[in-house]
Image: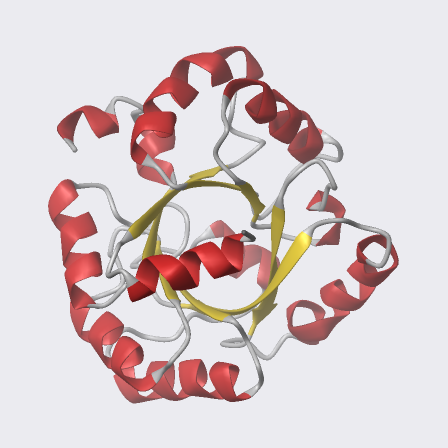
Amino acid sequence: MNIYQYILQSISKREKLLAILLDPDKVNLDEVSKFTQKINNKADFIFVGGSTVSNGDTENLVEKLKENTKLPIVLFPGDYTQITNKADTLLFLSLISGENPEYLIKQQLKSVPFLEKSSLEIISTGYILINGGVETSVQKVSNTRPIDQLNIELISRTAIAGMYMGKQLIYLEAGSGATEAVSQIIIKEVSKNISIPLIVGGGIRTRKQLDDAFNAGADLVVIGTAFEENNQLFDRF
């Protein structure tokens, strides 16, 4: 079964999913075997990617992870250079909340020559950047402005537009290092108005925030910075 079918099946069973996002620029490869023991027992997927990653670091991390976990490795790339065939799946991201063509379509075009020869499962994903209280790296790199959390109508319409465009997933992202997670009100409104799986990430650091996101309608929650800063986080879950 591919990853997308697994997500759909989990939703049909009312099961919630958890992913840990690892940034290749911030992970010490010597520590991978240690912290994957905790990930293996708690998470469903490992996402790999970052806004700015040195050439080759993504593939090195994926290879190391493959030695230490059976969990699916899902690429969450900041640009086309972070794609590697060593992973299982690629979130084929389009930053639909921004107006910068580089991240709407140009990065995607640059990836095509590689993907045409790749065995990766490709999942088309509408990526929506939400204001998380600080200027995040993805905001700087993409040169786009996040949507204010109070503008719930625009966020919801953007998600619906992504669905109408044929996206298989919608990803609401407050950004790495966000001080404010995507609000429950936003998650509820978007979840109510789309019929495709909803991913939520950014700013989630506690079990309560995780439960709040799930209860509001997130099908898959992504934890990144919190795990990077303290990989004992799961001890509280």
Give the number of marks: 0
Q: Foreground residue, 177 or 234?
A: 234
Instruction: Name the residue: 52% across, 72% down.
Output: 168
Q: Where does residue 130 sit, x and y in percent of width and height?
A: 37, 67
Q: Horizontal placement of 137 versus 75: left or right?
A: left
Q: Where does residue 89 sit, x and y in percent of width and height?
A: 61, 49
Instruction: Name the residue: 18% across, 67% down.
Output: 216
* Residue 174 visible, this orientation: no
Q: Quadrant of the C terminus?
A: top left
* Above or below for 38 versus 22: above
Colour scheme employed for the rendering of this structure:
secondary structure
Q: Horizontal placement of 134 versus 85: left or right?
A: left
- Quarter assignment of residue 40: top left
Q: Foreground residue, 26 or 41?
A: 41
Q: Foreground residue, 89 or 13?
A: 13
* Above or below for 30 versus 165: above
Q: Where does residue 116 sit, x and y in percent of width and height?
A: 85, 59
Q: Horizontal placement of 58 versus 40: left or right?
A: right
Instruction: Name the residue: 24% across, 81% down.
Output: 189
Instruction: Name the residue: 42% across, 75% down.
Output: 196
Q: Residue furthest left?
A: 208
* Residue 60 visible, this orientation: yes
- Quarter assignment of residue 104: bottom right
* Above or below for 89 versus 4: above
Q: Where does residue 150 sit, x and y in percent of width and height?
A: 24, 79
